[in-house]
Image: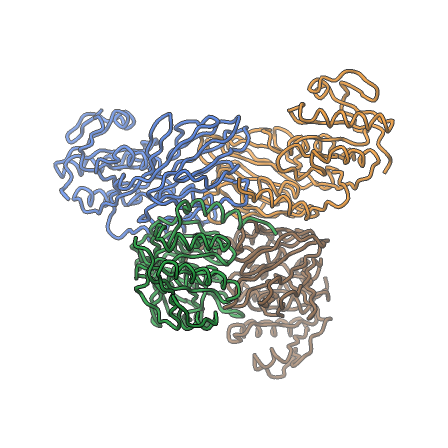
Chain colours: A orange, B blue, C green, D brown
Amino acid sequence: MNPVRTATVFTHRRPAETAPAIAALLGLARENGAVLRLDPDETRKHELEPAEGLVLDARVDPHVDICFALGGDGTILSALRTYAGTGVPVFAVNFGEIGFLATVDRDEAPDGFRHAFRAEFEVLSLPGIEVLGKRGRWLAMNDVSIHRQPGKRVADLDYSIADDEVGRVRCDGLVVATPAGSTGYNLANGGPVLAWGVAGFVVSFIAPHSLTARALVVAPSDVLTVTNRSHEEPVDVTLDGRPICVLVPGEEIRARFLDRQGRLAQLAGTTFYHRLREKFGRLATLP
Amino acid sequence: MNPVRTATVFTHRRPAETAPAIAALLGLARENGAVLRLDPDETRKHELEPAEGLVLDARVDPHVDICFALGGDGTILSALRTYAGTGVPVFAVNFGEIGFLATVDRDEAPDGFRHAFRAEFEVLSLPGIEVLGKRGRWLAMNDVSIHRQPGKRVADLDYSIADDEVGRVRCDGLVVATPAGSTGYNLANGGPVLAWGVAGFVVSFIAPHSLTARALVVAPSDVLTVTNRSHEEPVDVTLDGRPICVLVPGEEIRARFLDRQGRLAQLAGTTFYHRLREKFGRLATLP
Amino acid sequence: MNPVRTATVFTHRRPAETAPAIAALLGLARENGAVLRLDPDETRKHELEPAEGLVLDARVDPHVDICFALGGDGTILSALRTYAGTGVPVFAVNFGEIGFLATVDRDEAPDGFRHAFRAEFEVLSLPGIEVLGKRGRWLAMNDVSIHRQPGKRVADLDYSIADDEVGRVRCDGLVVATPAGSTGYNLANGGPVLAWGVAGFVVSFIAPHSLTARALVVAPSDVLTVTNRSHEEPVDVTLDGRPICVLVPGEEIRARFLDRQGRLAQLAGTTFYHRLREKFGRLATLP
Amino acid sequence: MNPVRTATVFTHRRPAETAPAIAALLGLARENGAVLRLDPDETRKHELEPAEGLVLDARVDPHVDICFALGGDGTILSALRTYAGTGVPVFAVNFGEIGFLATVDRDEAPDGFRHAFRAEFEVLSLPGIEVLGKRGRWLAMNDVSIHRQPGKRVADLDYSIADDEVGRVRCDGLVVATPAGSTGYNLANGGPVLAWGVAGFVVSFIAPHSLTARALVVAPSDVLTVTNRSHEEPVDVTLDGRPICVLVPGEEIRARFLDRQGRLAQLAGTTFYHRLREKFGRLATLP
């Protein structure tokens, strides 16, 4: 891999926490004759002034050499979606709680950045889930979930694969997760962990009012269709934790596996299984 | 038990479905020299006109001999709460889907009513859960649940029993159920079935982001306190399926077991375990 | 409570580990003018010689003031069963891994013993499960489990309560647990935790080949009957972790709740819920 | 595909049940100018005499055109293992209870055989799991499980993937299943269903004495190592339901995914998802 010449940065909503990391990045950019591009949002959030090595109010450029994501899962997922399909690796620093996608924790950031500018990292491809509905097309890096609306009756959802109805479930909702997303909401529903190399995605149910609803790992070539079977109640659709649309009674969405969407920078020595053990340790800790 | 002289009726929101049963009840009331009291809501819903054996626009009277509840779980639970502590038995007919609390299904209603007017039934006492918060006091016959609000972050709930913090869980929510309610929302969360004679209540979690959250059956003498530990997000509180209040960050509610609150009329030969098997059969059926 | 005059001791199978505690107990017995009774097994295991304050090769006496149990769950459960119904409190010291029943850990033993000799403890009553079969009658303090035999087909078990068949399950086995036992094998099967004050017991299934098998909390007045429905295979019955009998095809056992069987000494300040949180912390620790 | 010239048959242990199907097969073989080969076991079991179209006491020939398997899962799995890697399709008729691998039920057998002799079927490739230990090498078509021995303490198992220890669990056992096997023992442990096209295998735990043990779908390129960490107790290893070896303390086995091992004949119109729904219906039925 070539050394880094242009980089961009996304940070989470508390700029005071990430300001030292931004300063460190800028210093390294200058040292390495590289340029740091910040979009209008980041420029304003960090109150940055023009300076050497800095491009302010930049538009998102699919030709940067690397994207730094400093934040929790939300920020990192957003960076992965933004650069999906471009080949730009996302180098993620955990400023959140669990940080499964991050390659370093915040206190190891400066050392991590040095490796990043020398292109001393591996790149791991991550699959996504393409979501198609009559209101749009979206890409999920972690998960898509469908929920009943608050104060409304339980959702009544039908799920079919390759035009075979597999089940119909009255439930609070349903989650469709990628391997990277399997350790999140899916796990909270009793779904399995999917190792990052698994080709497929997993469907699990939130509070199913049925005794037969079990988590199902779908083959990568199969299309999942979920239909709102209620006669009265709309349901909400959420992608990587953000609301994207509503399904009115009778409306459906389709989901399918798309390989090699995101590219995640990884420092040597941090395998998925190693992180899994660490993450499980954190998830299991009582307060 | 004495024969029935005064009866009241609650029906669900689709009066066309329950109209024949109302007519049957009125016929039997006249035959038996009894009186049927309908509150203003029911009077209007069924468009009833003054007639022998009928008291229209009646106020709720805690001295009736029996209360008929024709509907799904919502209608029956509402009848049980209305007559909690009065000793009035609720005779429930299932016009809904599962109808665990009902003693007869809708097509057996006329025969069931005949037994009811002759007081040929047993009465089963049901415990409730008293819910105390700074915004009020409520009685749940089935369950109390606490949910994160839609579009907001996961709830961050702390639960303590007898002033010992037992756990703190990031989750979609938490359900506290009576034995009668244990086969509903609690079961959807992987909670256990509690036989109707069990003294205690059960706490289960909706999509817990923790590997250690397990369903817990609380002793009848213990008080459960649930606190909203989020710094930013309010959570919703729902009782027997209806919203009752919100807990702002830092706010708590307390729940305790109250024995012998509701009284449920039961025709001979329908034990809890018999129904359990039937209900599980229905819950397990694939469409 | 009166100060202790006579005490007995049960220890686990590695006497080298418990020898210092035995010595401490003997010292305290002499200081307090009390007598320590050891049965032939314990006498031989610890290679004790006659001495002041020591009765060797003693028979089990239901009139001692206290029983010390030094070991893991097996030793403590055995002491509880031995003194069930006699009123003798069991003061348990954890020399095992989790030690939910123990009131002190091994390193706090000397201090704990001092409180014990002064009768400075509370006594908690524990229920048991009476097991009745054609081959005998037994008392379980933790749990009774039924297992398929290795190399044989899955077990085919039918369970009925109060003569209603509730379900029939092909499975590796079934566990019936008291509240004290609920945090053991039952929890491993996805069963709920039962607080110690709950009146009832819980049935859970080991690897059920059925989608409808759910944990069931049985009321204290109900009798559970489990029948081996296989035409060919016997199943094993285990009580508190030890084999007690076999059920041939068609054979059944009955289980019922018996209140106030064991008496457990408790130092002040160690509630069930406090321990629960500690134990969950240990169960959740990754290696 | 070419019409069938040579076929072999495996049947389960109750020959009286499969005798009519054998007669039908022989009739069709003669009609089609084909030959039916039976190994010594099958020859003896069905008490067959020499006849046209019949080769008795035949050795297993990897060049037959088709293998008929008449029985339950055990018989079908055995046929799949016998012909693994040869390209011979297994045409399975369900004489057992669930029969997920079978393409027709017993009462549809004659019609199914007719399609088979005309080679009117699709062939589905099934992956296997290769198991390597110091005592041998085996191929599982459904699952490999490791169990504690009866009357012994719980198993203490460590599982690593690609040399990373992922977890260590005290449990009754552990199951490693292919997609075809995921609806069996794995599902009984709360593991997910894996659609047949998924590349990967799933690890689940039987009665884990840990709160963090969750089902894990392993990537097809990863090797799973399971080690018996007990200092005292051996554990049993079972493959597709039959005992294969024991692991003494400290001993390990390795498992890896092998694609395209078995070949399963499928009549048109029976997709995996269609069967899934049917099978779930049967699994969910209460007696």
Viewer-proximal residue, C46 or A188? Answer: C46
Q: Is residue B178 left or right of residue B38?
A: right
Residue that protrudes farthest toward the left in the picture:
B33
Instruction: Report which quarter residue B85 is drawn in.
Output: top left
Could you tell me which residue is drawn at 58 percent across and 44 percent down?
A203
Q: Nearer the viewer, residue C78 or A167?
A: C78
Residue at 33% across / 29% down in the picture? B137
> In which quadrant will I find the N terminus of chain B?
top left
In the picture, measured across the screen, residue B260 lies left or right of residue B203, that is: left
**Where residue A16 sits in the image (x, y, percent)?**
67, 23
Q: Residue at x 77, y 20 (%)?
A: A58
Compared across the picture, whether B62 is left or right of D62 comes to left
* Quadrant assignment, res A15: top right
Q: Position of residue B72 (x, y in %)?
A: 35, 38
User: Looking at the image, which is closer to me, D266 or C179?
Assistant: C179
The picture places residue C83, in percent across and down from the top left corner, at: 34, 63
Q: Is residue C212 visible?
A: no
Left or right of B56? Residue D141 is right
Residue B109, visible in the rendered structure:
yes
Q: Residue at the far bottom: name it.
A: D49
Could you say where residue B111 lies in the image, as x and y percent from the top left? 23, 45
